[in-house]
Image (cartoon, helix red, strand yellow):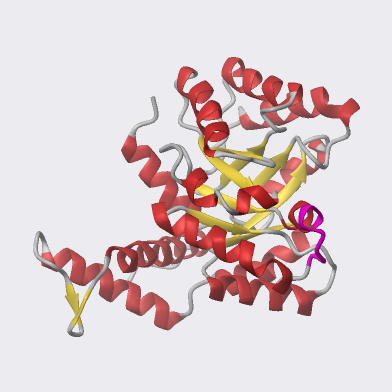
């Protein structure tokens, strides 16, 4: 069974992931390149970017890659096929039997909390520590996002699927047209303190990507997916906390630590649990960047 300390630790790591590079699992030649990219997480995709005839080959390649050791600070995620499909069930069976262990799996086109619990039950039986990230990419999922977030302790994030959601709604896929769904996903993720991952930006337009990412970060998204490695630097820059946010986060944690069992107070205001959670996200990003640059701790 998944232990609570492990889950809490990974929840903090995932909330500190700024960018997620989506890579087709049918292209193993790209795995090592993607792993060396500047992003914080890699999503190996078995679903929409893999043709039906390539599913088995992609599954074998992804699981072989996931069996290899890697830097513990780099997050590896596997997007399986829908567990309502035969291919999705094969993906889960392969995870159960193959000894491969991604940090988390993404459930595409997730419809309900029951679907999350069904997947969690399979993972429980495999004694794995794999987290679950349901996708919010169906109109019906927008209205049950909070239930999916609360469905099981393995749920560590929600991932907004922009393209499929826009198609399901019959809407254009602009940021503003999906604002309600984004807000629902952010609020649902906040109910349990998990990551809120934004949909990728589909155009090769740096200015548009920057506007999209800034709007999502201001709304409360903790990270954003990318379709191309060239997009990672721009996303990382937007989701990297500025110096004043880092200073405030240190003050929040210091006040919380000093309070002990008492109610923490900072500058005359009570430090709420949500403030502590956000401070932990900010400092986790900061510490990881310092560690990767080799700068001394301060």
Q: In terms of depth relative to the viewer, which is nearer, 18 or 178?
A: 178
Q: What residue range appears in magenta?
A: 167-173
Point out residue 272 in the picture as x, y percentages from the top left corner. 26, 68
Picture quadrant where residue 92 is located: top right
The answer to whether residue 137 is visible is no
* 274 to the left or right of 262: right
Query: Is residue 265 positioned above or below 46 on the image?
Result: below
**Residue positioned 41% across, 78% down in the render:** 245
The residue sitting at 73% across, 70% down in the picture is 177
Number of marks: 0
168 part of magenta stretch: yes
Q: Would residue 258 be visible to someone looking at this image? A: yes
Q: State the residue in front, 212 or 287.
A: 212
Q: Quadrant of residue 191?
A: bottom left
Screen quadrant of the C terminus: bottom left
69 left or right of 139? left
Pick the front one: 276 or 249: 276
Q: Residue at x 57, y 39 (%)?
A: 112
* Magenta run includes residue 110: no
Q: Quadrant of residue 20?
A: bottom right
Q: Quadrant of the N terminus?
A: top left
Look at the picture and state if 167 lies above or below 2.
Answer: below
Image x and y of residue 253, in percent = 26, 67
On screen, residue 282 above or below 160: below
């Amino acid at each position: 069974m998944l232990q609570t300390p492990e889950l809490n630790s990974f929840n903090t790591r995932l909330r500190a992931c700024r960018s997620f590079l989506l890579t087709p699992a049918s292209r193993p030649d790209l795995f090592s390149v993607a792993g060396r990219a500047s992003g914080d997480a890699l999503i190996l995709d078995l679903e929409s970017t893999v043709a039906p005839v390539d599913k088995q080959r992609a599954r074998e390649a992804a699981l072989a890659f996931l069996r290899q050791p890697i830097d513990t600070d780099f997050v590896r995620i596997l997007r399986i096929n829908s567990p309502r499909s035969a291919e999705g069930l094969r993906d889960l069976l392969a995870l159960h039997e193959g000894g491969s262990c991604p940090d988390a799996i993404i459930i595409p086109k997730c419809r309900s909390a029951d679907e999350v619990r069904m997947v969690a039950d399979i993972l429980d039986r495999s004694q794995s520590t794999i987290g679950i990230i349901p996708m919010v990419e169906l109109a019906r999922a927008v209205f049950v996002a909070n239930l999916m977030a609360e469905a099981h302790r393995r749920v560590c994030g929600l991932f907004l699927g922009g393209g499929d959601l826009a198609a399901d709604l019959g809407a254009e896929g602009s940021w503003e047209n999906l604002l309600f769904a984004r807000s629902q996903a952010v609020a649902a993720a906040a109910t349990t303190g998990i990551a809120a991952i934004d949909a990728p930006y589909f155009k090769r337009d740096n200015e548009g990507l920057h506007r999209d990412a800034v709007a999502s970060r201001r709304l409360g998204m903790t990270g954003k997916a990318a379709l191309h490695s060239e997009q990672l630097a721009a996303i990382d820059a937007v989701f990297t906390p500025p110096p004043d946010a880092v200073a405030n986060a240190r003050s929040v944690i210091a006040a919380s630590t000093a309070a002990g069992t008492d109610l923490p107070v900072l500058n005359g205001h009570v430090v709420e649990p949500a403030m502590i959670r956000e401070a932990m996200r900010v400092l986790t990003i900061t510490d990881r960047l310092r560690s990767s640059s080799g700068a001394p701790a301060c």
